[in-house]
């Protein structure tokens, strides 16, 4: 009973640690659902069919990341900084994405037959329709999630992240049960469930999403700071989108659908080690924005150190279990990519730690530092992927990503030392962290 009461208090609390706990739990559930989805699709379509499905669903994610223009992050920043004008910020953000969706959809419609030239014509046709439908949905998801974060509505934020893959999994199981193995129907089901989740989120945030009519001068005044900050972080997010998706672009252009099927499975399985760090990065930025610089650095630094320590202690023994589960759940053919899986596990925790640290730059209004870091790391990673992939295949891609993650972390630490005069020793180790962790554990047991 005592443990149940402690869990209940941790789940219901509104502090930073409580919010991270809830978001970490949601991340874990999302990871479980995504893994189950990978298992179902691997069993439904096999290695090559899994790769073709991944090629279809890849493009909306990439394109939505390229045309976000920093608005989700800017919406969080401006809503946290501004006393009034919130309605105008929200209205301007959503209205701007409408023409962006149309233009992006048109480009995708004419470009996908060329981008997927190495795939069967029916795969490119399915990808066309799916991309046009999903780009506005994904842009809306990003804005709704940002609004929920800025308003402290993490139940909605976590719900969006969980319900989309959960509904997708339920739909896939339904299709499998009736014997429908069509990639087209799977893509249609993915789009429909995403629309339903977006509708639920917008209804849940109805008090904060009030479009009404155009506010004239007031909306124009609100749009200026919104796009001013968005332009600062857009470069960072653009490079981040390219960084996170360039590996799949390389596979699409240099390797086969079978390789893409193998890679999507081991990559998704390796992301289990990013559950806590992703939660921290997503929660820390809206929580610390507006605080004093010293407090931001102290809070983010402690989150970085504790997460890196805990995840490093977990990754070594459990990644061998992950390989075993990969063979049992997905099938023997997927063990072909086990070496890439090991490399991606370490890349995951190093990259996750660097993103936690980078959130402090955005919170202090210095996103240019993250842009510089991302530019250098992306350039190095792109060169490595293009160089290593033709020789080592999937292992070359995983090795290139691991080296890129190390470079990002090193550049972030160097920036903190040079710009903010933070001692590297203090950023990497602080014995008070253990006292802080012990106190938090005691609070949960009470």
Image (spheres, rainbow, N blue to C red):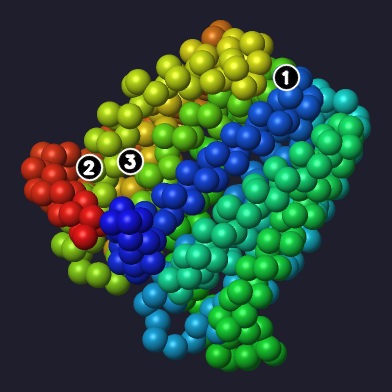
Which residue lies most toward the front here? 1
Front-lying residue, 341 or 136:
341
Q: Are marks 2 and 1 in contact (CB under 8 Å)?
A: no
Q: Nearer the viewer, mark 3 or mark 1?
A: 1
Residue that appears at 65% across and 52% down: 164
Residue for badge 1: 47
Q: Are marks 3 and 2 in contact (CB under 8 Å)?
A: no
Is 322 placed above or below 104 here?
Answer: above
Residue for badge 2: 305
The location of residue 88, given as percent across then percent down, is: 56, 84
Residue 361 circle label: none
- Determine whether the residue tagged by mark 3 lies in a helix, strand or loop: helix
Residue for badge 3: 353
Q: Earlier in the sequence, mark 2 or mark 1?
A: 1
Whether residue 137 sits left or right of residue 439 in the image: it is right
Quarter of the image for the N terminus: give it.
bottom left
């Amino acid at each position: 009973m005592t443990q149940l009461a402690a869990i209940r208090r941790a789940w219901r609390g509104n502090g930073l640690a409580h919010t991270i706990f809830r978001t970490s739990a949601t991340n874990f559930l999302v990871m479980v659902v995504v893994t189950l989805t990978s298992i179902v699709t691997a069993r439904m379509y096999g290695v090559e069919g899994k790769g073709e499905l991944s090629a279809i669903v890849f493009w909306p994610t990439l394109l939505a990341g390229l045309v976000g223009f920093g608005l989700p992050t800017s919406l969080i920043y401006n809503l946290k900084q501004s006393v009034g004008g919130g309605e105008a910020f929200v209205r301007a953000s959503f209205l701007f994405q409408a023409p962006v969706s149309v233009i992006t959809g048109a480009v995708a419609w004419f470009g996908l037959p060329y981008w997927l030239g190495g795939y069967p014509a029916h795969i490119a046709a399915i990808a066309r329709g799916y991309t046009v439908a999903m780009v506005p949905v994904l842009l809306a998801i990003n804005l709704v999630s940002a609004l929920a974060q800025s308003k402290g509505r993490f139940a909605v934020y976590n719900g969006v992240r969980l319900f989309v893959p959960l509904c997708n999994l339920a739909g896939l199981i339904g299709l499998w049960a009736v014997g429908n193995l069509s990639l087209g129907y799977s893509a249609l089901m993915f789009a429909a469930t995403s629309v339903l989740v977006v509708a639920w989120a917008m209804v849940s945030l109805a008090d904060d999403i009030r479009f009404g009519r155009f506010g004239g001068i007031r909306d124009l005044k609100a749009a200026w700071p919104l796009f001013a900050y968005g332009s600062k972080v857009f470069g960072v997010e653009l490079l981040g989108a390219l960084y996170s998706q360039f590996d799949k672009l390389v596979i699409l252009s240099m390797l086969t659908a079978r390789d893409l099927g193998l890679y999507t499975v081991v990559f998704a399985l390796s992301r289990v080690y990013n559950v806590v760090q992703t939660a921290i990065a997503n929660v820390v930025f809206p929580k610390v924005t507006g605080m004093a610089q010293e407090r931001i650095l102290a809070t983010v630094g402690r989150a970085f150190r504790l997460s890196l320590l805990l995840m490093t202690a977990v990754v070594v023994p459990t990644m061998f279990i992950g390989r075993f589960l990969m063979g049992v759940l997905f099938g023997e053919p997927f063990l072909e990519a086990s070496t890439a899986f090991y490399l991606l596990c370490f890349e995951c925790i190093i990259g996750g730690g660097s993103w936690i640290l980078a959130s402090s730059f955005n919170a202090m209004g210095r996103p240019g530092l993250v842009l510089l870091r991302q530019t250098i790391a992306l350039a190095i990673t792109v060169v490595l992927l293009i160089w290593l992939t033709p020789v080592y295949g999937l292992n070359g891609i995983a090795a290139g990503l691991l080296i890129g993650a190390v470079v990002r972390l090193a550049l972030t630490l160097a920036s903190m030392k040079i710009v903010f005069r933070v001692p590297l020793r203090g950023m990497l180790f602080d014995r008070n962290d253990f006292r802080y962790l012990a106190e938090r554990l005691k609070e949960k047991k009470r």
